Image (cartoon, helix red, strand yellow):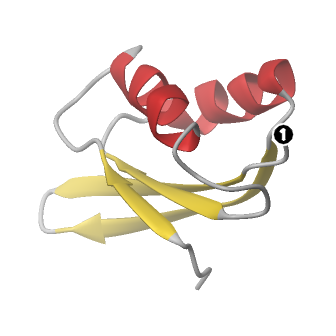
């Protein structure tokens, strides 16, 4: 299980909102901090790595878990600039 400095809950939001909210939130972090983005949108599995590649931030992990009837995704992004 990964550790994050800040957690961003995007449950109930679908593409492109988790990425838009991530983009806003990561600006509040300092260099080297890790943001955990919690989502129930399966699209985050491909959208977050693509966003990291585009913006230069580092994708440090992705976790999945089953919560009752929902699949939850946790993306971990390190602010690098």
Q: Quadrant of residue 63?
A: bottom right
Residue 79 in the image, given as x and y percentages of width and height: 74, 49
Above or below for 58 versus 30:
above
In this rendering, the answer to whether 16 lies above or below 38 is above
| Badge count | 1
Judging depth in this view, the residue of 79 and 58 nearest the camera is 79
Going 34% across and 56% down the picture, which residue do you hit?
Answer: 72
Compared across the picture, whether 76 is left or right of 53 comes to: left
Q: Nearer the viewer, residue 7 or 81?
A: 81
* Residue at x 77%, y 55% (from the top left corner): 31
Q: Residue furthest top?
A: 16
Residue 11 placement: quadrant: top left
Query: Residue at image x 75%, y 24%?
Result: 50
From this view, report whether residue 34 is shown above or below residue 5.
above
Compared with 76, 2 (above or below) is below
User: Who's the residue at 54% across and 28% down the image?
Assistant: 23
- Give the quarter of the figure containing the N terminus: bottom right
Label 1 packing within 10 angstroms: few (<14), some (14-19), many (20+): few
The image position of residue 20, as x and y in percent, is 44, 20
Secondary structure of the residue carrying numbered label 1:
loop
Instruction: Name the spot of residue 80 as percent of width and height, x first.
Output: 84, 47
Whole-percent x, y for residue 8 in the image: 36, 52
Residue with the mark numbered 1: 81
**In the rendered image, which quarter contains the C terminus?**
top right
């Amino acid at each position: 299980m990964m550790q994050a400095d800040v957690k961003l809950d995007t449950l109930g939001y679908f593409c492109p909102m988790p990425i838009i909210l991530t983009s806003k939130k990561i600006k509040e972090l300092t260099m080297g901090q890790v943001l955990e983005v919690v989502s129930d949108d399966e699209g985050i599995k491909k959208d977050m790595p693509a966003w990291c590649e585009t913006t230069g931030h580092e994708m440090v992990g992705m976790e999945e878990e089953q919560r009752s009837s929902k699949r939850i995704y946790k993306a971990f992004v390190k602010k690098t600039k």
